[in-house]
Amino acid sequence: MKKVLFFILVPFFVWSQEEEDLLSQIDTVDANTNVQSAFKALKLVNFESTKLAAKGDFYLMIAHRFGYVDNGFEDFFGIDNANTQIKFLYGVNEWMTLHVARSGFQKTYEIGGKFSLKPQEKDGFPFAIVGFTSAAVNTEFKESDYPNITFENRLNYVAQALISRKFSEKLSLLVAPTFFHENTIRDTYNQEGELILPNPQDNSQYAIGLGGRYKFAKRWSVNVDYAAHLNRANESIYKNPLAIGFDLETGGHVFQMLFTNAQAINEAGFLGQTTGDWTKGEIAFGFNLYRVF
């Protein structure tokens, strides 16, 4: 429990303009020395970006990940099977954004924070460094199925360093070393459905995220992110998450349309429990929609 409290407490210490470009309005930037935010939205695709909410800004984010499209009309290309996340974010100050969220995936409730450690400077430091932490509760576990389950068994938490560089007005790149811990690992099975006993998945897991954004039109950009899991059990059925998306900047909100093999939206979910295989057409359509107040 001490680990959980540490990861929760770290970040606590350490209607907008209509037809104008909303993103230009809400960029957090020091015009004298710092480079404007490398990304226009708070998320790249699945991963968090190095953008924070401006002080006093309140965001509503609604995200959907539908089922895989490979079943065709049987479930209308996955639309019948939607996972939804509703997230509220608040810019406490220029260097800290806090959020609460609820996801349909494993009926998860989450709190977390994103905080700026070092901005990219025009004639100085070449990167922006942002920390992200979250703690989530999996409420899908039922006491009737797990009579000895405790609150601590339901927890998972994430600690992440987001490092970005804005190379030009069109191109920005991101790397994200990540640690996440699941207090309860569901039984891991191989492709034949046999329980793996000799080599179970470690509760503490590591990943490295890579991503980028390329702006190809005034209000459009293409975004990509990918995570390599560094200590996944050899026999695990889970895959590395890959997402490709498009940002549309409109008056009043940002709309991100995307394709990914991950149906979970929270970090521990898409990093540790992605089952889709791009080579087999196991790809889900989804979107992230933001509204700032």
Image (cartoon, grey):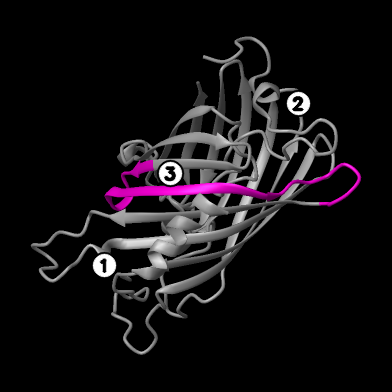
Residue occupying image coordinates x 66% and y 33%? 40
Mark 3 surroundings: few (<14), some (14-19) or many (≥20) residues within 10 A:
some
Q: Which residue is mark 2?
A: 217
On screen, residue 230 versus residue 266, left or right, reads: right
Measure the C-alpha gap from mark 2 to mark 1: 47 Å
The reply to whether discs 3 and 1 touch (Cβ–Cβ < 8 Å) is no
Disc 1 on helix, strand or loop?
A: helix
Measure the C-alpha gap from mark 3 to mark 1: 33 Å
Q: Is residue 265 visible?
A: no
Task: Report the amino acid beneath label 2.
Answer: Ala
95 or 25: nearer the eye? 95
Q: Quadrant of residue 238?
A: bottom left
When the figure is inspected, residue 62 is found, relative to residue 153, above or below; the finding is above
Mark 1 surroundings: few (<14), some (14-19) or many (≥20) residues within 10 A:
some
Q: Quadrant of the N terminus?
A: bottom left
Q: Which residue is mark 3?
A: 69
Q: Which residues are magenta?
A: 101-126
Disc 2 on helix, strand or loop?
A: loop
Q: Which residue is mark 1?
A: 153
- Asked whether residue 108 is drawn in magenta, I would say yes
Residue occupying image coordinates x 23% and y 54%? 139
Mark 2 surroundings: few (<14), some (14-19) or many (≥20) residues within 10 A:
few
Task: Report the amino acid beneath label 3.
Answer: Val
Q: Nearer the viewer's eye, disc 2 or disc 3?
A: 2
When the figure is inspected, residue 143 is found, relative to residue 72, above or below; the finding is below
Task: Report the amino acid beneath label 1.
Answer: Asn
On screen, residue 212 versus residue 76, left or right, reads: right
